Amino acid sequence: MDKVIIIRWCEIHLKGKNRHYFEKLLEDNIKNALNDFKYKFIKISGRYLIDCFDESLSADFINKLKKVSGIHTISIAYKVKSDLNDIMNTALLLMKDKTGTFKVETRRADKKFELHSIECSRQVGGFVLDNNQNLKVDVHNPKTTLFIDVRECGDTLIYTEIIKGTGGMPIGSAGKGLLMVSGGIDSPVAGYMTLKRGMKIDCVHFHSYPYTGEGARQKVVDLCKILSEYSSGIKLHIVKFTEIQEAIHEKCPEEYMITIMRRFMFRISERLAKSIGAQAIITGESLGQVASQTIESITSSNSVIKSLPVLRPVIMFDKLEIIEISERIGTYETSILPYEDCCTVFLPKYPLIKPKLDRVIEVEKALNVEELIENAMQNIEVLSL
Amino acid sequence: MNNLIYLDNGATTKPSIEALEKASKINLENYFNASALYQKGVQSKNLLEEARKNISNCVGNNFEVIFTSCGTESDNTAIYSYLKRGNAITTLGEHSAVHNTFLEFQKNGFDVRFAKLNEDGSVNVEELLKLVDEKTTFVSVVHVNNETGAINDINYIAKRIKQINDRVIFHSDGVQAFMKIPYNLSENIDLYSVSAHKINGLKGVGCILKNKNLKNLKPLIIGGGQEGGLRSGTENLFGIKVFEYACVNHFKNLTENYNKVFKLKEIFIENLDKSIFKIISSDNCSPYIISLSGVGLRGEVLMRLLESDGVIIGTGSACSSKHKHSRMLKEIGYNTKILDGVIRVSFSYENTIDEVIYAVHKLNERGLQLKRTINK
């Protein structure tokens, strides 16, 4: 018996006259994700079908499709000729191990099919009921729903499972952003949520060899690799931040280290974003989680940005909510590996919680900001993941 | 200096080329299972027994050699065999293979007692003896401490313990001592752990030296009955032969190597900038290991700086949030400023004076640079 994968989207339907653009993007992204496989791609109204594929690889297909933004749900369906007997037997096959309550929902696009939708549901439902003693019908709140889709072309698709996809919008439909990745739990989650909304991302990480080591760097590479599975590849820009940290440590009071460090990170990110055509900076900041993420601290670092929006997908999320997503997307275990992204040499004992912007600007004057940024911009390693 | 200067020999050593070459035919010619009954199998068995005999000759005939996969397995075998009743004693200066195994037993309710250390990492013998009583069944004291190189006089300690309670089984982790410092194992030593890759053998091979009079050693790994039932599993003949050749070579040159390394340690300490570094190891420690600290600096950062200069050293202080400081040095009571900056330099007989001089000068340079940066 043939199997077919049904791909459905959701928000794209809202796009009116622009639907075609989004659908085309989604189609391209799906084909990209399934690059290594052989299959036939069929467009039907409101859905895509994957046909003629090696069914032993079904799980692999689903795993890839679950990571394509814009896909709302996926189902693996049996495909049979639109013949009532075939439909009934296939329906029974699908339902033979099921227990509890069920109902049948038929959609009929083929006007040549002998039964109306309701009549079809009734007959198939009755047949299944007769042959499986462990089932009862409940049309209001069934445990299992058996879907029958009688298509125009003479085939019928039958399935019970609706697998949730990533949702969101196809990548490429929302421009490009630059994600600041620290190696912690939050920034990869922010990256995932950005990709989900259809925005492509490059990533930037600030590394301070010899104060931070290979472990911290590899952690970030691994996190970006995981994110790249939700996109078609990601570029990671690793900025050598050592000189800047040493300069701040030397010339500014200890408690300003983090505050001023973040201002430099934002400045460099803005310049880098411009040079790669990114239209926004994205961070994993979450309000009040640490000293550098109070509203005052965020104001202080944000104020150096001149011409791009800074998007903060998890700004109002609780830590637990962020962890939940992190576990779901597969970044949590890597994020908690114990490699510090900032050497304790530079961590102030009492970092500023509510820096006053004019005081920060005053303190920063001791540094040659432009020169430090220029040097850092010359010391960026780019990895394609 | 173009080649790498490797000074982390306490972690592992480079395999001896001579030993590798001499053993190389094992892989493709003598690959047969030493337990097989056909002639080729018996030949492998003979090679195995030859290794056993030659290693045994380096130790003295009171000890049997039982091959294992590593020092950790040897430690575990000893402990799991005898921690059955009464109480057991060890020190706070053990390698984690011993320490963590004892902790595991303690977690399960076994009475485990840890003896305090002296400042250089050696065990405080009087404190240790105070913990021994008539219910003590097992004592484990490391021979040479892997972090500081401190030497415990295990023959003396074992004798004193057995004077208090002659039924105690005495084990020592000899991984950092074997074929490095000159000694003989006395009859009071029941079990002794050895690791091949610390003496230019290969990783994946070690042994237990078992006192011939010791009874009831139980295997940790059960199966086909190899090693007299004490360690089942097909023997790693190639690894064991490399171990044998490396061991015999070391034995031959033990005194010469010791004197050479003693000189290296002297030169290192002489040239070390003591305004930046505090030496933790004492003069009585094994010359093969020096523990020191860049006070107020960061051990891992120093290690990276030296790596970029082509010198590899070990650290006893990691920047990782899980294992920040040396458990052992913290126990002794060193403060945070010292603990943060701990590094370990460990020699091999192959290191040269030029290498050591270069390394210590680079260490001074980088230490000063880091000190200036941190203290602005």
Image (spheres, coloured by chain):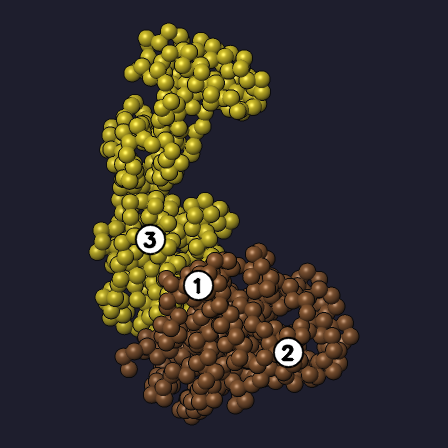
| Mark 3: few/some/many CA within 10 Å (<14, 14-19, 20+) | many
Q: Which residue is mark 2?
A: B189
Q: Secondary structure at mark 2?
A: loop
Q: Which residue is mark 1?
A: A339
Identity of the residue drawn at 40% across and 79% down: B7
Q: Secondary structure at mark 3?
A: strand
Q: Which residue is mark 3?
A: A179
Counting from the top left corner in percent of width and height, residue A302 is at 35, 57
Identity of the residue drawn at 39% across and 16% down: A107
Identity of the residue drawn at 37% across and 38% down: A60
Q: Amino acid at mark 1?
A: Tyr
Q: Is residue B358 visible?
A: yes
Q: Chain of mark 1?
A: A
Q: Amino acid at mark 3?
A: Leu
Tell me the mark number nearer the camera, choosing from 3 and 2: 2
Q: Which chain is brown?
A: B
Q: Amino acid at mark 2?
A: Ile
Q: Chain of mark 2?
A: B
Counting from the top left corner in percent of width and height, residue B267 is at 41, 91
